[in-house]
Image: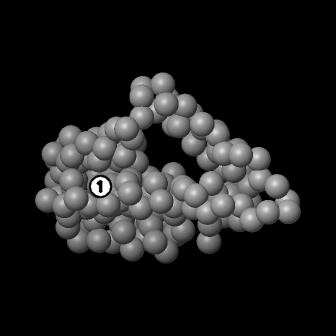
């Protein structure tokens, strides 16, 4: 099931490159998510932010950008769009006036609940051709990769 060893004297075939395959899986998932979640008008990034906020009472924009692994500029833009739709509330943090605190509105919670089945369907469709064991191995391997690179990534602070 694994890729053959890459030899230093040959070009690594495109369809065996981890970066290429990760990008293709991401493209496939985003396409499925867009198709299945279109009625809700929420992008995968916005869905991640809504989900992160649903897990906590409130969070500042910097914390949210770290949770969803986005740069602060992209996070701020997505949060502004969610706020304009009335799905989140943003305001000055009570503990740090330089920081914007965010929380879900009732409308945001309701939309997240309404789209849960469609989002779950997109996740399932992404890996439906895999057995339960293969799914567990894939998710485990991806979590291991992300975890191993988390310390390295935080050095560069995404901004």
Query: Is residue 4 positioned above or below 88 on the image?
Result: above
Residue in the picture at 64% in, 57% down: 17
Q: Where is residue 96 in the image (x, y as percent from the top left)?
A: 52, 61
Instruction: Note whether residue 60 is visible.
Output: no
In the rendered image, which residue does mark 1 sit on?
A: 32
Q: Which of 93 and 140 is in front in this view?
A: 140
Placement of the N terminus among the 4 image quadrants? top right
Q: Where is residue 156 in the image (x, y as percent from the top left)?
A: 71, 65
Q: Is residue 39 left or right of residue 89?
A: left
Instruction: Note whether residue 16 is visible.
Output: yes
Q: How is the image coloured?
A: one colour
Residue in the picture at 49% in, 74% down: 73
The residue at the far front in this view is 10
Query: Is residue 21 positioned above or below 125 on the image?
Result: below
What is the crowding at mark 1: few (fewer than 14 residues within 10 Å), some, or many (at least 20)?
A: many
Query: Is residue 135 positioned above or below 156 on the image?
Result: above
Residue in the picture at 68% in, 58% down: 153
Q: Where is residue 68 in the image (x, y as percent from the top left)?
A: 48, 55
């Amino acid at each position: 099931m694994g890729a053959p060893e890459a030899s230093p004297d040959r070009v690594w075939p495109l369809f065996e490159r981890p970066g290429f395959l990760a990008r293709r899986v991401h493209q496939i998932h985003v396409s499925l998510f867009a198709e299945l979640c279109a009625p809700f008008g929420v992008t995968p990034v916005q869905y991640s932010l809504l989900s992160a906020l649903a897990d906590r009472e409130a969070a500042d924009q910097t914390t949210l950008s770290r949770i969803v692994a986005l740069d602060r500029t992209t996070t701020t833009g997505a949060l502004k769009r969610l706020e304009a739709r009335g799905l989140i509330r943003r305001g000055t943090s009570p503990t740090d006036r330089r920081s914007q605190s965010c929380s879900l509105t009732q409308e945001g919670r309701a939309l997240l609940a309404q789209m849960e089945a469609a989002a779950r369907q997109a996740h399932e469709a992404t890996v439906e051709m895999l057995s339960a064991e293969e799914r567990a191995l894939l998710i485990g391997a991806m979590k291991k990769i992300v975890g191993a690179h988390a310390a390295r990534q935080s050095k560069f602070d995404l901004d």
